[in-house]
Amino acid sequence: MEIKKVGVVGCGLMGSGIAQVCAQAGYDVTVSETEQAYLDKGVESIGKFLAKSVEKGKLSAEERDATLGRIRGTTDMRDLSESDLVIEAVPERLDLKKKIFTDLDVSCQARTILASNTSGFSILELGLLRNVLTRLSACTSSTLYR
């Protein structure tokens, strides 16, 4: 399956970084957050990081604009339903992560790959839900750069 659309749940430090890297790699990214203020802060941090990269000559203004143009924010996690890959990047609370994966299992297509950026839980703990185990994988920042 070719991945074209990436969803990211959470737009804090990790989520905004994941969204940025995916958008810079050319993927259309939808990032979700629970509140508009959190979403705005996360997208703003992406803009600041990209602006610094332009200032340092590591990125052109056109590349910055193209990257930002591939990122769409939402406060409705159901907007991730058309994603080919969804990466969860929320605080390390097992109850929260399980709820997110249960909701994603219902709203996303069966072909959608579900991934977690967890550092504190076994992927098996997160996957012990209805159908999620068959399509759940671990995702760390190092795997995004390969």
Image: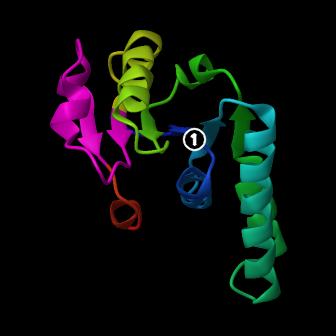
> Which quarter of the picture shows residue 131?
top left
> Which quarter of the picture shows residue 72?
top right
Q: Which residue is mark 1?
A: 10
Residue 104 placement, left or right of 51: left
When the figure is inspected, residue 78 is found, relative to residue 28, above or below; the finding is: above
Residue 50 placement, left or right of 7: right
Amino acid on which the number 1 mark rests in the picture: Gly
Asked which secondary structure carries label 1, the reply is loop
Q: Nearer the viewer, residue 97 or 87?
A: 97
Residue 81, given in percent of the width and then of the height, sits at: 52, 19
Q: Quadrant of the N terminus?
A: top left
Residue visible at 35% across and 58% down in the picture = 140
Q: Nearer the viewer, residue 128 or 92?
A: 92
For the magenta stretch, what is the residue range? 114-138
Residue 143, given in percent of the width and then of the height, sits at: 33, 61
When the figure is inspected, residue 105 is found, relative to residue 141, above or below; the finding is: above
